[in-house]
Image (spheres, rainbow, N blue to C red):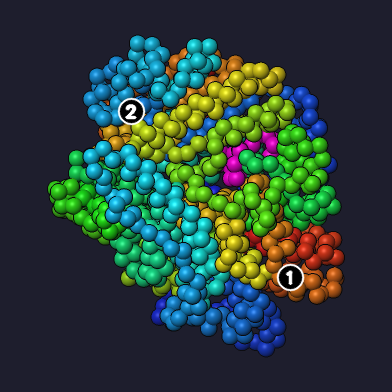
Amino acid sequence: MNAVSRRHFLLGAAGTAAASAVGLDLAWSGGHRSPAAATDLAPSDATVVLCTLYGGNDGLNTVIPYNSSAYQSLRPSLAYQPGDVIPLDGTLALHPSLAGFKKLWDSGQLAIIRGIGYPEPQLSHFRSMDIWQSAVPDTDVSTGWVGRWMDATGADPLRAISVGDLLPMMMTGERALGAAVPVTPMVIPGDSALAKDFATLCTPTGSEPPVLAAIAQSGSDLLRVYATVSAAMGKSDPYDTTTSAVGTFDPTGSSSVGATPAPSPPAAATGAASSLGAQFDVVNKLITAGLPTKVYEVSQQTYDTHADEKANQAKLLAELDAAVTTFVEQMANDPNGRHSVVVMYSEFGRRAQSNASGGTDHGAASIAFIAGPAVKGGYYGEYPDLTKLDGNGNLVFNTDYRSVYATLLAKVIGEDPKVSLGGSFPLLGFV
Amino acid sequence: MSLKGEIEPFTLSSHPPHRRFIDPFDDLKVSSALSTRSDVAHLLRRAGFGPTRNVLDAAVASGFDTTLAGLLDFSGSDPADAFLPPAMEWYPADLLSAGPGQQATLVARREQFIHEQQKSFPDLVAWWLQRMLTSAHPLREKLALHLHNNFATAISKVRLPLLMYDQNQILRTMGNGNFETLTQALAKDPAMMVWLDTSSDKVQHPNENFARELMERFTMGVGNYTQSDVEQGARGFTGWTIDRMTGQYSFNPHQFDSGVKTYLGQTGNFTGEDIVHMATNSEASHRWVASRLWSFFAYPVSTDDPVVVNDLVPLYAQQLNLADLLDAIFRHPGFTSSQAKTGLVKQPVEWMVGAFGALGLSFSGSIGKRAVGALRLLAQVPMDPPNVGGWPQNQYWLSTASSLSRWRIAEELVKLGDISLVDETSSSDRPDAVATMLGITDGWSKSSAAALKDVSADPVQITALALVSPEYVSN
């Protein structure tokens, strides 16, 4: 599938348009899950935080069968030796960068889903990430599993927030769209009078072509999200611009974003470019403030380690370990965060056998981590048999990835999984 | 998305079809003139970066066909050449090898060199933006932007700005020729070879990265090849490497897998060049190239859209010539349909360059670097796409975060630019004046008109809001 067809246009949701048009008066006022502006939201305080590891993380070198002779012989120069890893038991060990995850494991707050994947694995980053984010493995669809949940149960963009500049496919529905909240503070230009004019400008008329309607809708959604998020981030008057960030084109602004636009790290499908810790920090603030959001997304890139894998993966996993460990600790101590669940997944694992560049090519089945104060730690699914690889030399899955989504929908989001997934999938016991 | 019911059937012939807006009846001349203005403005937006008022007036006077012929002609001098790129270098010889025990120092010195080189990256991007803004051949730059998106390569992994500049020149100088020739050149382009690990593709364990993306993202699209084709193709590129001293492509026969390969249904003792030849000459590639080009210049379509299959592929398949394909796209009745005119969101680069033109700004000097920073907020820095898939279209650019960044940047640009046309107009006429300034020919919606009227007393605010209006943010 190409990138053009998968993001074809969505008409703005009429219901959201109405709410957004008056978004200026809907700044949510704080407190525990009593959002006057979002009455369509489930009352439960449980929250899903999806952490997308773009590029295809090497599951085999993340949760490592360190005593397996098959593992050692598949990866002569890439295998970790027993003395280098963090053992979980006599069979499996964590990557040396994951010391914080070991503590979560020991306190029962880390679940490891083994052998996760889907039938007929796709080795394209884009196709496989679409499969993960859409929850539809066999046909090409343009909606994501979170987006379809919003379509069915309420289109308020605040119900699903991705931290970063772009909205991932998973939060795109037929009508509903989640919100993208930048890592940097949200500051809108001008005063409330100008914001009202912007709201007028961005009110869909109902008769414009779909592209123009979608542009208008994004502006309306911005005002709705801005009013709530800026309040949650501690700004008493969202239209007080005296604390504005330095302007992008202000030639005197030494901290201007325009001054030193350093190259970003490479990515393998898409996702936010800022540090994972900074993204989790935004989620922490929004959850702590009790925002009526059920699903958050953060992302990290890029795990596409075709060459020089050891150094690259170690750096990425160390960042993941620090960010998630800190976040889970914060959530455990927050009344609004106690039931939050972090889900770490990637579009595929990597080839069992290493290549000649000190790396691995695209693979199939892998592992997923689930962490949180209320998570039931332990193993779920079976570790794939390294002596029974598929025709491409990849690990074979035994746990359907949609079981994770079904479990999140049923146990955390509080919805019949069918509204998003179409069919039924066995629930897992991690919550 | 078919065009049924909207336009008359279109067939390719040696004679260009008559354009719909050329109306022989006198009583329709007024609407025809308006329609010409709308069509020409649309052409200049899509085949360039949004015309200034004077350019649009001149193009309307000379008509659609003459304007198109001028856009397609890349010959002649270009005043944009006077604006030079920053100084950039390949690794000096003393950073390429180390004596015994000096390896660690060498790595550190090389990192320092890369760090110094990367300081020129914002200047390099600003250089390209300035070319987009000022080139006498805006379609050449627009086509280069499309091809950059198709063969997406990023400084984030390539690291040396010089390599990105060299690749950019390939896109510019070879973009309107034969697609296979272009792909062959890009396959051996050092930036590409670093980006997709071709230079570490060795006979014992081929690296699949380039072989896969060659088919998936560059020439054919997913679903038209198998994993076996990826593996067999990768064998063809074994031995391809970068000469350390010169930084250019070189072939190492000792690392080449000279065995028989089966690729896309053909069997032979294939080289990398053979692999590129077979990929670019496949039927899937014809549909891929035509649909990608149509999607970029007209509106998003799939590879099996009737416009692609019936109208574009038969012509393109003859010569694989991109100039011919562009000509067919711009002359196609579907190009000036309402579906096309309202079918795209401006990419941030298009929005930024268009705004600079309308406001009389330049990317030379410090403001150019700041524009690159602003583009990072908008998630589109040329030469630094997020991944090998490049930038998607339309909804991708419409997140709430992007909407906020666009608005903030518009407010600041207006304060830097020349808005005398709006300033010197009475409040009541300012919505029309700002439409003229931005090249908006088809009027404001009810919502936009109400908002602009409300801020019309303030020439800065009316211009800023117009820059983020649905009419201007669409392409």
Within 10 Å of disc 2 (Cα), the crowding (few <14, some 14-19, many 20+) is: many
Eyeballing the image, is B250 above or below A51? Answer: below
Q: Is residue A257 left or right of residue B166?
A: right
- Counting from the top left corner in percent of width and height, residue B65 is at 53, 81
Query: At 46% from the left edge and 63% from the top edge, which residue is drawn?
Result: B86
Chain letter behind tag 2: A
Q: Amino acid at mark 2?
A: Leu
- Cα separation, mark 1 vs mark 2, equals 62 Å
Q: Please, is residue A356 above or below residue B242 in the view?
A: above
Please tell me whether mark 1 or mark 2 is closer to you in this view.
1
Q: Start and end of the magenta stretch? A: A153-174
Disc number placed over residue A202 in the picture, else none: none
Q: Chain of mark 1?
A: B
Q: Looking at the image, can residue B394 be seen? A: no
Residue at mark 2: A395
Q: What is the number of callouts on the image?
A: 2
Q: Is residue B407 visible?
A: yes
Q: Secondary structure at mark 2?
A: loop
User: In which quadrant of the rendered image does the C terminus of chain A lie?
Assistant: top right
Q: Is residue A93 left or right of residue A278?
A: left
On the image, the x and y values in percent for residue A389 come to 28, 27
Q: Is residue A164 magenta?
A: yes
Circle 1 SS class: loop
Q: Are marks 1 and 2 on the same chain?
A: no
Q: Position of residue A355 (x, y in %)?
A: 27, 37
Residue depicted at x 27% and y 53%: B244
Report the residue at 47% width, 44% height from top. A265
Decide which of B314, A113 is in the foreground and name it. Answer: A113
- Is B468 magenta? The answer is no
Query: Type of residue at label 1?
Result: Ile
Check disc 1 and report the residue beneath it.
B419
Along the viewing direction, whichever of A258 and A86 lies nearer the viewer: A258
